Amino acid sequence: MRIGLIGAGNMARALARGWQQPVLCADPVAERAEELAAETGGQALASNAEVAQQADLVVLAHKPAQLAEVAAQVAPHARAVASILAATPLAALKQAYPDRPVYRFIPSLPVEVRQGAVVAAADDQQDAALDDSVRELFGSLGTLVTLDDALVDAAMCLMSCGPAYVALVAEAQIDAGVRYGIPASAGAPLVVQTLAGTAELLRLRGYDTLAVRREVSSPGGLTIRGLDALERGGVRKAFSDAMDAVMRRAG
Ligand SMILES: NC(=O)c1ccc[n+]([C@@H]2O[C@H](COP(=O)([O-])OP(=O)(O)OC[C@H]3O[C@@H](n4cnc5c(N)ncnc54)[C@H](OP(=O)(O)O)[C@@H]3O)[C@@H](O)[C@H]2O)c1
């Protein structure tokens, strides 16, 4: 399947690296498209229309505000369209791209290393073979979860904003270690490996977060004191507020 990326920004680059195959692409900044094409062994084209003409699947990786402007160039030529635009429901996508298969996904930055969380918006069957191939394409980037379209923006707060939240949490832990004399160069691998290892354990325990916390927190021990301090510091409330902040803008 020839993939054509509209926009060659951060997420387009992450997707292309994850797919590990040559892509077609276009971007208002020609050098940006050329750089991405060169990295994947693909081709930068001069216009969005040319990408749509040559691609089997057009992947919209521009900003949501450019939906109508891009659709005017791409819709006359595109065979099938997959969108990664935030806060852009399926209905709006189908209105912009009528009479052809249209898919909605939200990826997260770790798709670059094929460890991304990807949300797919549930939809009726459009073209059985193509539906399967497109799902497989996005599924190859990590873990794919299908949700009702109305829930996709909320999910985005968890998994697409998530890498930034997790990076901030890691940074805060590393800095806490620095206060006690652990250099960041030693603290960072310790903290990051703990994140990766805990993720693996959580999967193994069926995502039972409490079970993992209980295993680490012996009664009267050290960890429970740390957890108590985090709760008093408002860690749950902070994540809940982050969700509200994102949803106020996206919903
Ligand atoms: N970043 C994430 O973690 C993430 C996660 C999930 C979904 N998304 C969605 O992914 C999309 C891209 O996000 P991003 O973070 O990669 O943004 P980005 O780095 O700004 O990339 C967007 C690219 O599209 C280009 N562009 C602007 N107008 C265009 C046009 N008319 N035709 C073709 N390309 C055009 C931009 O060029 P200029 O800079 O010159 O305008 C830029 O290179 C957004 O819709 C966002 O909602 C992002």
Image: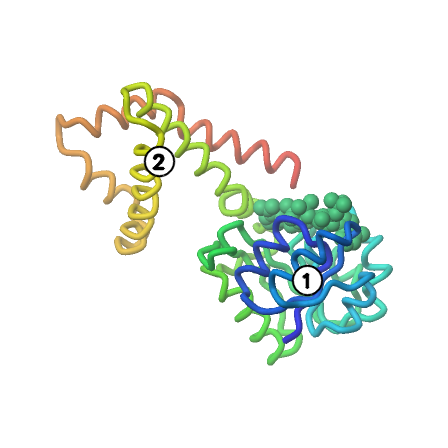
Residue at position x 84%, y 53% in the image: 69
Task: Return the residue nearer the eye: 47 or 211.
Answer: 47
What is the residue that sits farthest to the bottom in this orientation? Answer: 129
x, y percentage for residue 189?
33, 39
How was the colour assigned to the protein in this rendering?
rainbow
Where does residue 217 sit, x and y in percent of width and height?
18, 34
| Residue at which label 1 appears | 59
Any atom of ligand 1 within 8 Å of the CB at mark 1?
no
x then y, percent, for residue 153: 60, 47
Mark 1 closeness class: few <14, some 14–19, many ≥20 residues within 10 Å: many
Q: Is residue 38 left or right of residue 194?
A: right
Indicate the amino acid at tag 1: Val
Q: Nearer the viewer, residue 52 or 139?
A: 52
- Left or right for 152, reference 75: left
Q: Nearer the viewer, residue 67 or 182?
A: 182
Above or below: residue 141 compared with residue 224: below
Q: Nearer the viewer, mark 1 or mark 2?
A: 2
- Give the Cα distance between marks 1 and 2: 35 Å
Instruction: State whether residue 70 appears in this view.
Output: yes
Q: Which residue is mark 2?
A: 188
Q: Quadrant of residue 149?
A: bottom right
Residue type, label 2: Ala
- Tell me the quadrant of the picture where the C terminus can be found: top right
